[in-house]
Image (cartoon, rainbow, N blue to C red):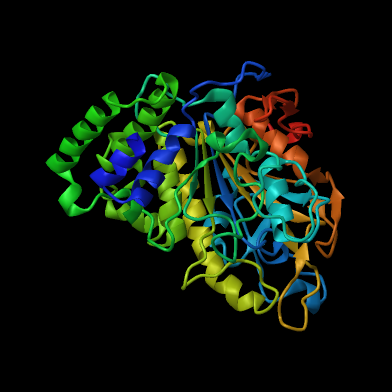
Amino acid sequence: MRQERIRQAKFYSRRTMLRASCLSAIGSGIHLTESIEAVSHKPTAKSCILLFMIGGPSQQDTFDLKPNASTEIRGEFNPIATTVPGTQVSEHLPKLASMADDYTLVRSMYHSGSNFHAAGVHYNLTGWPHAPRAGQPFLSRRDTPSIGSVLTQLEGRRDRQKRHALPTSIHLPMYITQDGAGTEWAGQHAGYLGQKYDPFFMDYKGEMPGGLPNDFVPSVENAGKRLNYRAKLLEALNKESKVAREESKRFQQVQNEGLSVLGESPDWQAFCLDDEPDIMRSRYGDTHFGRSCLVARRLVEKGVRFVTVTWPITKEYTHFDTHADNYPTMRKNLPLVDQSVSALIADLKQRGMLDETLIVYTSEFGRTPVINPNGGRDHWPNVYTTMLAGGGVRSGMVYGSSDKHAAEPKDNAVHVRDFVATIYHALGYDHNTRVTDYAGRPHFVVHGKPVRSLLR
């Protein structure tokens, strides 16, 4: 009966309300399962920003060049020196080269998953292989939860006393996929923990980040005093509800959280860049990726524990899945990576936040050593390069190496499960920590062990 009255009231579109209010089940910590076992220690990182490069950038053309290899392996790009003696990166990453003492490269990453994109996404976001199934594994409730979802169950909302606090885990500016709605790749949500622990997905659907998407903004006729009036009307309708008390309480929380967004709750203005100086926005870059990185910094300033920023696929910039035309794509994409990632590291450092914020740069896999006849490189989980900065990890070093063709790890190989365990360690949890699925069964959060040589 209540839902029918709400529909009749037509405060704003049902889609707007659903998108704005879905966060109430994310990070609210309404009733955590008692069997959760958080084996924790003092974290070195208050927050984590994970930068996910959709498609799998070529390690040979970014952070692990092989200038002495043959032409079909070496490729077209030249290495340049960095501020760390003996360490080189691509000529298209000059800003990152100038600050190499602020991050660490792991050049010996690998995983044993299939060549499917979604298999690599799942492995890198969870530390586990996806639940068995044929073909490209899309999102499934059978799968392991993402890191942010685990934190949401373990910790709930970071500030539980604050009514409209931001969720524990936020994902922007789009889902990780190359093919649109309905084909989102595995590993991005809470999996078997259940929907209420999903990250808060801020999918801009092609809109430029830096404000609340249109679905979150009430129409002019429904804003201001009229919105407040209708909120009071909604409250009156709720008092007349015949729904069971506990269910009514939860439903009202959903409504209140949605109204906090529509009513421009101060915390939610972290998504809006209007008050950022022009010079800061310019430093990050006026692009989907640059703006998303800037929003991520603002979110961790507000206490958000885990922020995932995906490389956005737009009309101007495509993904890194370069089966063909590898070099034109990389020449276009890498300057944006260089600008935005370097700006994020420098900005956090300048604000005194880098030591308490872990930045992770990764992807589903690397690319094949040999350039194919189409001028591209194909999928290659055997070895790839990731980056870590801040948050209690060591900086100014390269850990591990690949062989002369960037085809296999040569020394200090790091399986992705250990890489993810290192992230959990920085956030304060070890491999004995358990979460509970929607059926009440316990699960360890990660199978690997942290790479101690990466930690301070």
Write down the quadrant of residue 115 in the picture.
Answer: bottom right
Q: Residue 205 location, x and y as percent?
A: 44, 60
Q: Residue 340 location, x and y as percent?
A: 47, 56
406, 299: nearer the viewer:
299
238, 213: nearer the viewer:
238
Query: How many discs appear?
Result: 0
User: On the rendered structure, is 448 left or right of 389?
Assistant: right
Q: Residue 264 location, x and y as percent?
A: 26, 40
Give the residue at x 66% y 32%.
424
User: On the rendered structure, is 68 left or right of 22?
Assistant: right
User: Which residue is the extreme one toward the top?
Assistant: 34
252, 107: nearer the viewer:
252
Write down the quadrant of residue 412 in the picture.
Answer: top right
User: Which residue is the extreme one toward the bottom?
Assistant: 373
Q: Is residue 62 above or below residue 398?
A: below
Quadrant containing the C terminus is top right
Q: Is residue 275 above or below residue 331?
A: above
User: Which residue is the extreme one toward the left?
Assistant: 225
Quadrant containing the N terminus is top left
Give the residue at x 19% y 41%.
227
Give the residue at x 28% y 55%.
278
Q: Is residue 338 above or below residue 257?
A: below
